[in-house]
Amino acid sequence: MTKKTAVGLVGVTGYTGMELARLLAGHPFLDLVRATSRQDAGKTLAEIYPFLNGSSLGRLDITRPETRDLASACELVFLAVPHKTAMVLADELLDAGLRVVDLSADFRLTDPKVYQAWYGVEHTCPQRIPEAVYGLPELYREQVKAARLVANPGCYPTSAILGLYPALAEGLVHTEDIVVDSKSGTTGAGRKAVLATAFCEVQDSFRAYALGRHRHTPEIEQECSKIAGREVVLSFNTHLLPINRGILSTIYTRLKVRADSEDIRAAYERRYANEPWVRVLPQGALPETRWVRGTMYCDIGLAADPRTQRLVIVTAIDNLCRGASGQALANANDMLGLPEDAGLGMAPLMP
Amino acid sequence: MTKKTAVGLVGVTGYTGMELARLLAGHPFLDLVRATSRQDAGKTLAEIYPFLNGSSLGRLDITRPETRDLASACELVFLAVPHKTAMVLADELLDAGLRVVDLSADFRLTDPKVYQAWYGVEHTCPQRIPEAVYGLPELYREQVKAARLVANPGCYPTSAILGLYPALAEGLVHTEDIVVDSKSGTTGAGRKAVLATAFCEVQDSFRAYALGRHRHTPEIEQECSKIAGREVVLSFNTHLLPINRGILSTIYTRLKVRADSEDIRAAYERRYANEPWVRVLPQGALPETRWVRGTMYCDIGLAADPRTQRLVIVTAIDNLCRGASGQALANANDMLGLPEDAGLGMAPLMP
Amino acid sequence: MTKKTAVGLVGVTGYTGMELARLLAGHPFLDLVRATSRQDAGKTLAEIYPFLNGSSLGRLDITRPETRDLASACELVFLAVPHKTAMVLADELLDAGLRVVDLSADFRLTDPKVYQAWYGVEHTCPQRIPEAVYGLPELYREQVKAARLVANPGCYPTSAILGLYPALAEGLVHTEDIVVDSKSGTTGAGRKAVLATAFCEVQDSFRAYALGRHRHTPEIEQECSKIAGREVVLSFNTHLLPINRGILSTIYTRLKVRADSEDIRAAYERRYANEPWVRVLPQGALPETRWVRGTMYCDIGLAADPRTQRLVIVTAIDNLCRGASGQALANANDMLGLPEDAGLGMAPLMP
Amino acid sequence: MTKKTAVGLVGVTGYTGMELARLLAGHPFLDLVRATSRQDAGKTLAEIYPFLNGSSLGRLDITRPETRDLASACELVFLAVPHKTAMVLADELLDAGLRVVDLSADFRLTDPKVYQAWYGVEHTCPQRIPEAVYGLPELYREQVKAARLVANPGCYPTSAILGLYPALAEGLVHTEDIVVDSKSGTTGAGRKAVLATAFCEVQDSFRAYALGRHRHTPEIEQECSKIAGREVVLSFNTHLLPINRGILSTIYTRLKVRADSEDIRAAYERRYANEPWVRVLPQGALPETRWVRGTMYCDIGLAADPRTQRLVIVTAIDNLCRGASGQALANANDMLGLPEDAGLGMAPLMP
């Protein structure tokens, strides 16, 4: 048996940290040797996550995050900590020679002024931005393989960009009339003691939030602009679903081509022909979040409407797996020369 | 104590029938004397709805729908049967001198050709269409009071039209760039033994359906066109929520006025100033389906976005109460000269 | 129109306070004139409960709890505050001449030593215990009518005691072999920012808690002992359901009579013959929490098992309405000489 | 790469068939070459299960169940068909030389008269009963390895027997006073178009069913009697949870030893010391269904109550994986000489 590569996870107590632990528990080539948390240091992983009882991972001691300790033990570190904290840690770990996959927003935006405008804090590590690669495999796989720092995409942006990519790249839709209506499961709000996401405040209800003001907006616009080759400003709007996992985005575009054109589906199938994790659904089929639960799949449904000359694109991903930890793991696999899908090749849990 | 007015309910076994039974159980002026169902005739209401045990309504015998019997016993009849069946019954009951509130789609569209195009069947009772009043109290209250036949609005149209009314009536938004993204609780799919709405096929999941093709589209367009004074063609799209009750519609419009204009909120507050069931939420607040559960309220939130010069309107209603049976009851109250809110004055059930 | 009686509510921000607000919003004879909360004083009720927007109750200002102010404004006060706090307030309010319905546990147990043993704190107001009436209408209605202080029963005890009452009163079952297996909706855990009851920690899951150690145990035993005329020690065990409202208790007893005896059902029907809120379900039917949602009903199903000579009693109540605020309101009605069901006569919200 | 063993699945359209498909999609040594369904023959697996799109399994054509065809193509067949149908097929497939794992109840009961009494039909294949091995690995692993026919345990019995095994085997509890109170997720009711398990009939509600009359009763009693060495008659009672997967059983026993005895936990830890899939939780911890979601784990919590001298045992399993298809796969692995956990070594999906 080949020796496994040692990796670390900074910030194990949130849902993205929990999901990385789940995925790493069964990874054939990676060995989680450090899991850190300021609040839970001293406990074992199984003490905070009883579902890991009985696995070797469950016996891992949680430590406090120390750069020197991480550097001595790991080759690569996942950062599952809040933005602003992440950039400081990433800088230190890169200086210490490690590779870093940052799940926060700190290195996703190429313009630190845009970062400051939307996140309300100054970017204190702008010199690292140029070397960060935006870790969406379908768009940047080759750059990821050579990267030392990967900015792991946000959950909503993953669902929006993958949905818009073929339409924008092939110039099928107008760039100035795009609306993204996204709905996310409640894990997207993080693992916190907050009344607004208490069970009885969410169950059997549905609500919108942050309309037009969500921080993922500039990330979607940045990547869509790159794809389209011109500046894209769009309307991005979010809702909270009473489900655990999943994002479904309904994306409204105005067609340049005829609605019954065969170009539309052909473009999607061609652009994703070799992408194992993007499934363009058959004509008439529309995605459901349960069909991608726990996996890296992004399902895409297409509905062209001749009455309004619109193309409605629907995408579904698992916000924790494809939208965060699974994608982070795929990026780590690519950075380390492993098969991209190592530890990720599972069928969805249905129902 | 005044004598109550006798009413009948044709089609008691669906969710709209069930909801009418719930509301009529506590109505101060109406007495449900007939409840019909072909499949459950011979049972009492409590046998099929154990939650009515202990109420006098629970002891009512379910009968088969017979026009003569209904005519002899009732002054007004609610039709909670499928479209196509409803038009036949309505015609007979009107001939027999009764008043009718039809919860189906049969008399909502003024043009029978549009009906045929979207419902796929011929309208066999077009001569009754002109006398039917579209029963949305905020728009047609006075006509309802004089009506013998009320076409009760669809659930989605109620949420869309109430959201768009002030914006269109005051010319605040362009009429050719409207997208309605609606999400409905599963009672909207009816009370049927169908795998697609089985618990384990809906729970912890979310999906889109009938994009651009939902039958409520022409109803929304017809009423919006009347309000705007010009033909409105819009994109209407629907999703299924893993909740029992509630519709939340996120409506995307493009502003003619400036996004920070005070005209927007003022128009909404003015248009609904005397409407007890429409609540224009304070600046910054957005609706949640739980806040209207079990009631006639339509909550409206407004988010103007200067970046995209759009107005996003969010509405929430209870699809069974406001979107069907409660509204039918309000219409019946109006038709019978009773207080419009008789039997309807309750606070939402929270949580 | 008769003048309404002024009442106050101390502790409006929890789920029981929210439920009392819902019920009082439609009460024909009571007027909520004070609603207090230390944390939300200065806001209106509608600001913290948007579902009350548009009602006169929504405009009520939340105040800080001041005995003098309450005494000057109210005739009766509901205490929806934590145990230990409640006993202090109750004492002051009674001294000031008010009537008090205490929703906490402070005056439910007749023996202060038992209180101290289970609640871990000393009872500082034992002199008030003798005058407190345990507010279960079916058992103590007449005493409630004369009471100045009512100890409102706990949610679990209501479901257990009503289920066991006929069996114990008629000596149908052995008193030393009773197991109560209760399952509660998550509102029972209170309205708090706590990770253990966050949506994603409860949704699509189920768990047991506090087996054999729940604080409602002595309350159940005290009342069952009174009914049976001998000391009853039983096993009481609780579980958390991923639903908002409802308690279903499955109660295991060993029969003294034959399992097929007609005495069993007859005893239940006789004991509850004149009780409008207790529904002994027909043979073969078993309760469901949705059939009592939002109401005062306690549904009871009986299953006698000849193989094991056991009687399994199943009860369902709404933990917030029957198990707390609705029952408190019924007690207030009785104390004030109003019809017991004033403001409470509604059909369940189904589904 | 070694050649995989060809297996077949008769009855792919139910939840147990779906779960077997999920598990076999990632199995390293087994190749699903036949999946049958009378109603869906002619479609591909991905057509009925869109979550299998993109996997090779998704392209498998569904066929009609033909013994000759199955015999020519497979070495082992899983039967996921209703009882009564299963016994006929099993007999034919065994005659044709195949190994069979039967997920139905047809070969679980050793006495055909007991089968007839509880299932209401005659057993037409009693001669096969003696060779069938009850496939609970912790009790019968060695016999399974040599078996040609395995009777896969029921979901409820798995949760009850594993919970009671150490207590009964070590004589810690009385055998005549056992109550099993089980709660199951709705997948346990099967994948059918039935109103009783429609979303809006289950969501936000909870109910009991089949108290004292569930068909799994004799299966639990048979195995408990074998373990205890004397006839065990117990009270078994079931409830329906508004969750997809999971069974939690709360088992009430009366202790022979002292409640604070160290023997209790020691017995459980000793009996399951080498069992990777049974996790005896630390003192004070109680199982939750989410901690075992999608896995073979059976979590066990123990609560001894000195007040009542009872031992309350709580077990949690995934009813589809441990309670049906995963256990069937473990049995197939054992029968084929493969590692028992092949294809089953995953961490739970949390949340």
Image (cartoon, coloured by chain):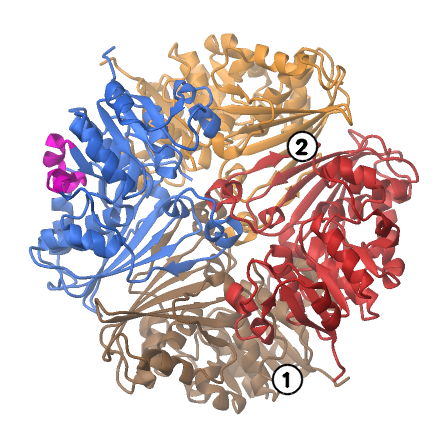
Chain colours: A red, B orange, C blue, D brown
Which chain does the residue under circle 1 lie in? Answer: D
Q: Nearer the viewer, mark 2 or mark 1?
A: 2
Residue C280 is inside the magenta segment = no
Name the dominant secondary structure of the magenta segment: helix
Kind of residue indicated by mark 2: Leu
Q: Secondary structure at mark 1?
A: loop
Q: Residue at x 59, y 83 (%)?
A: D333
Question: What is the span of residues highlighted in magenta in the rendered image?
Answer: C127-148
Residue A162 x/y as whole percent: 79, 48
Q: In this orientation, which residue lies closer to the viewer: B18 or C193?
A: C193
Mark 1 lies on residue: D75
Q: Is D317 above or below relative to D274?
A: above
Q: In this orientation, which residue lies closer to the viewer: D39 or D165?
A: D165
Q: In this orientation, which residue lies closer to the viewer: C162 or A232?
A: A232
Q: Quadrant of residue D116?
A: bottom left
Q: CA distance from mark 2 to mark 1?
A: 57 Å
